[in-house]
Amino acid sequence: MSKIITPNQESIQEAIRTLRKGGLVALPTETVYGLAADASNPEAIKKIFTAKQRPLGHPLIVHLGDVNQLIKWAIDIPDSAYQLASLFWPGPLTLILKKHPDVSPIITGNQDTIGIRIPSHPVTLAILREGQLAVAAPSANRHCHVSPTIAADVLEELGDQVDLIIDGGPCAVGLESTILNLISAQPEILRPGMITAAQLTEALHTPVAIKEGDSRIRVSGSLKKHYSPQKPVFLLDQADDIELIALRHKKAAVMALTPSPTNWTGEWEVMPANPEDYARLVYGILRKLDRTDADVIFIIIPPTTPSWDAIHDRLKRASTKN
Ligand code: TXA
Ligand code: MG
């Protein structure tokens, strides 16, 4: 089994040594846990695809410790990238830029673009900075599963496929980073996250929209089914009659913003009413409900205002059948 280790000076050095040797280290980030390999070592990166059972061709995000490293990984970097970096990095924003010719095509799924971010978790920042490392790191779950937001979930997902798991506590954001394409004529969001279209629009003084439908750029997070528990998940409108559902599904587990009806006997999780707290908890609750003996999970959909966009995106994918 892999080791879960608490972060201290010694374990930070162990993580750096493991990455330099071409090993896989699960690292805490503010969004979700990442499965990291040295981004300059193609052999190490191949192990990520094997461990996650992720099809080759799905590009990985490169995580840097410092914005000065950007020119090693990207070319023709627009001013807007530096502007956004100064506002949102370290933080949950991934920028799609033109890839540097020296970057291994295995990172970018053979595309000429690259996704880059600086994560804000202090332990991972220390590993990247002290080790002078850049790491490629997808979320540390098996392909299409729910992303892990605590170290124990990484162990459950990947078992001994990872050399080391650094326990950085629960992730503060809880949903994957916003992915912003800076290659297109107008910047566009390829995957919504907790940095919103409105924040990016304000920062860039230009409209930033969320891309709908298929993009020519392959984003594994835009496959229909993703972030998905094992049990079937259904989304319900607030208006749906939960008591009728209870009659039909004796073993339903429910995630809602409101308390359960008094005669409810199954699992019922009351979620926070603000999007930040909801996002932080949602994956952990989905895992918890998936471990119960319920045969189905119902989610009463939260509000549809823009600050809930990223949550809606993940709930829709969790409930998609294929
Ligand atoms: O918050 C996050 O972004 C987490 C933490 C660990 O940083 N990482 C993450 O990685 O969610 P992953 O691999 O699970 O999802 C990364 C997404 C994928 O959908 C991938 O297709 C997309 O980023 N991506 C990466 N490089 C890309 C590129 N060059 N063009 C378009 N999409 C890209
Ligand atoms: Mg993922």
Image (tube, rainbow, N blue to C red):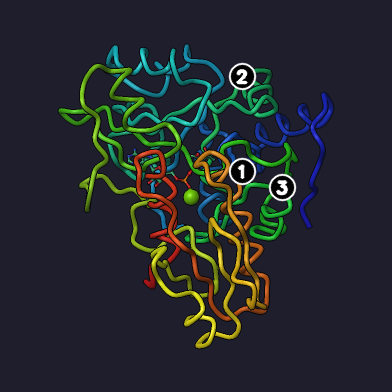
Q: Quadrant of residue 292?
A: bottom right
* 91 shown above or below 18: above
User: Residue placed farthest to the left in the image?
Assistant: 185
Rendered location of residue 241, percent (x, y): 44, 75
Q: Is disc 1's CB within 8 Å of ligand 1?
A: yes
Image position of 229 (left or right of 112): right
The quarter of the picture where the N terminus appears is: bottom right
Amino acid type assigned to the residue bearing label 2 in the image: Gln
First along the sequence among labels 2 and 1: 1
Rendered location of residue 274, percent (x, y): 52, 41
Give the residue pinned by disc 3.
151
Rendered location of residue 121, percent (x, y): 63, 28
Q: CA distance from mark 3 to mark 2?
A: 24 Å
The quarter of the picture where the C terminus appears is: bottom left
Q: CA distance from mark 2 to mark 1?
A: 20 Å
Of tags 3 and 2, which is closer to the observer? Answer: 3
Q: Is disc 3's CB within 8 Å of ligand 1?
A: no
Q: Quadrant of residue 106?
A: top left
Q: Are marks 3 and 1 in contact (CB under 8 Å)?
A: yes
* 185 shown above or below 223: above
First along the sequence among labels 3 and 2: 2
Amino acid type assigned to the residue bearing label 3 in the image: Ala
Give the residue pinned by disc 2.
132
- The residue located at (29%, 12%) in the rendering is 79
Front in this rendered view, residue 106 or 306:
306
Q: Is disc 2's CB within 8 Å of ligand 1?
A: no
Image position of 228 (left or right of 17): left
Instruction: Give the total number of marks visible in the rendering.
Output: 3
Q: Are marks 2 and 1 in contact (CB under 8 Å)?
A: no
* 179 shown above or below 223: above
Give the residue pinned by disc 1.
33
- The residue located at (27%, 35%) in the rendering is 112
